[in-house]
Image: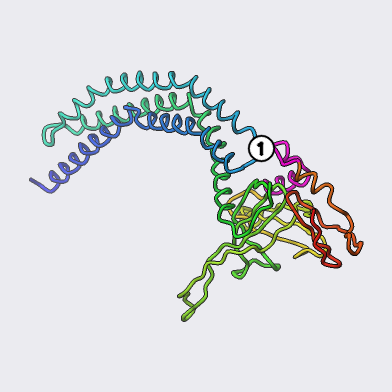
């Protein structure tokens, strides 16, 4: 056999292998297995969604009252689409697989040394054309439930964040006030001067219906050898907390070269742990945080409650004294729902509510 003949035979073998490989992939695609799996996964997640909501309510997540109604709506939408989806999958798969059989037979008959290159190329072109038809049929079935899948995915992601926030609350090193309800959390870095550096604490920012709290959670180097860290220590401690009503001039800014860094800035009254606070948020939109803090501050968030607030605790905070009974000094700090005592800034008297 001449070198050119050997090279031609090798190319024919590659072409036959390619045809058979493409056919194997096409048979799988024409079975609609990926669409079946996607539809089955969506059905399973929608069916489990009411239980997920029930669990976050049992863990006292008080907000996003629309979740229960959304869960029912998703179930109703899927019930209305399920038969159509399953019927189309079965019908399209059966039809396409039947049309593939002649191509399968022709591919099986390919033989190195006896099948002309033109026959192989023609079959490859037919497979490519058939794949376009299969892709179109798959997209048509997916279109039946894609909008439901997308809208459910967005709401499900909200519950993912809520579950994560509740887990972070459970592992917090500080306590929450009786009846205080978490709204959202995010990983963040507290920039304590005018430039972000390695000394700035990293941790979790908590927004409740009453306070903004930052807890440091990070591993820090405790020992280095030749600039290489050899020992680390996990640090978890409360860095600051402030009543939301004390927060002013909240700014959300997108920074960095590509404007993809989310920053949150705000001011606090004199006498606070800081007059200005700047936080670099990790993974959540700073504008959403700005809006959420303002909603807590204005009381607008209360309209989202699914769990009733303790009215007795509200009344206790509302009727708190405005002057110290011991020295007569003014009590100016906000009294939060759930507090049992307040401390006079002038004489140190602890006043029970």
Colour scheme employed for the rendering of this structure = rainbow
Considering depth in this image, is 332 or 20 the residue closer to the camera?
A: 332
Query: Farthest left residue?
Result: 1
Q: Is residue 9 above or below residue 226?
A: above
Q: Is residue 133 visible?
A: yes
Judged left or right of residue 126, residue 186 is right
Give x and y (percent) for residue 212.
70, 54
Q: Tell me the residue at 86%/53% (across/down).
A: 321
Region rendered in magenta: 287-311
Q: Is label 1 in a helix, a strand or a loop?
A: loop
Considering depth in this image, is 281 or 16 the residue closer to the camera?
A: 281
Q: Tell me the residue at 24%/34% (across/down).
A: 19
> What secondary structure do most residues of the magenta stretch adopt?
helix
Give x and y (percent) for residue 117.
19, 34
Judged left or right of residue 215, residue 219 is left
Give x and y (percent) for residue 58.
57, 40
Q: Quadrant of residue 97?
A: top left
Residue 293 lies in the magenta-colored region: yes
Q: Is residue 182 above or below residue 174?
A: above
Quadrant of image for the N terminus = top left
Q: Tell me the residue at 71%/47% (across/down).
A: 209
Judged left or right of residue 70, residue 348 is right
Q: Is residue 287 visible?
A: no
Considering depth in this image, is 291 or 129 the residue closer to the camera?
A: 291
Residue 5 lies in the magenta-colored region: no
Query: Farthest right residue?
Result: 328
Task: Please state the total of marks drawn on the protein image.
Answer: 1
Judged left or right of residue 71, residue 264 is right
State the residue position of label 1: 307
Give x and y (percent) for residue 6.
13, 45
């Amino acid at each position: 056999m001449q070198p050119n003949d050997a090279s031609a035979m090798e190319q024919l073998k590659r072409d036959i292998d390619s045809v058979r490989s493409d056919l194997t992939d096409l048979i799988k695609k024409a079975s609609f297995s990926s669409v079946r799996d996607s539809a089955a996964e969506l059905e399973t997640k929608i069916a489990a969604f009411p239980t997920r909501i029930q669990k976050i309510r049992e863990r006292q997540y008080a907000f996003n009252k629309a979740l229960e109604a959304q869960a029912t709506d998703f179930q109703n939408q899927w019930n209305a689409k399920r038969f159509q989806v399953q019927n189309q999958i079965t019908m399209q798969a059966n039809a396409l697989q039947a049309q593939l059989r002649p191509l399968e037979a022709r591919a099986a008959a390919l033989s190195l040394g006896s099948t002309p290159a033109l026959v192989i190329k023609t079959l490859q072109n037919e497979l490519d054309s058939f794949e376009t038809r299969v892709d179109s049929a798959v997209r048509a079935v997916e279109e039946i439930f894609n909008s439901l899948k997308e809208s459910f995915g967005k709401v499900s992601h909200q519950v993912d964040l809520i579950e994560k926030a509740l887990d972070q609350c459970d592992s917090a090193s500080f306590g929450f006030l009786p009846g205080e309800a978490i709204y959202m959390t995010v990983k963040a870095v507290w920039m304590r001067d005018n430039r972000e550096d390695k000394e700035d604490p990293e941790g979790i920012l908590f927004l409740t219906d009453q306070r903004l709290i930052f807890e440091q959670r990070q591993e820090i180097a405790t020992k280095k050898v030749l600039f290489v860290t050899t020992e680390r220590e996990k640090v978890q401690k409360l860095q600051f907390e402030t009543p939301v009503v004390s927060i002013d001039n909240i700014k959300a800014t997108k920074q960095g070269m590509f404007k993809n860094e989310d920053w949150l800035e705000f001011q606090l009254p004199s006498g606070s742990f800081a007059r200005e606070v700047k936080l670099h948020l990790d993974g959540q939109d700073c504008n959403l945080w700005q809006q959420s803090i303002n909603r807590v501050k204005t009381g607008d968030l209360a309209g989202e409650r699914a769990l009733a607030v303790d009215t007795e605790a509200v009344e206790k905070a509302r009727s708190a004294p405005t002057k110290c009974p011991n020295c007569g000094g003014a009590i100016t700090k906000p009294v939060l729902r759930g507090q049992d005592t307040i401390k006079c800034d002038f004489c140190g008297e602890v006043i029970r509510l």
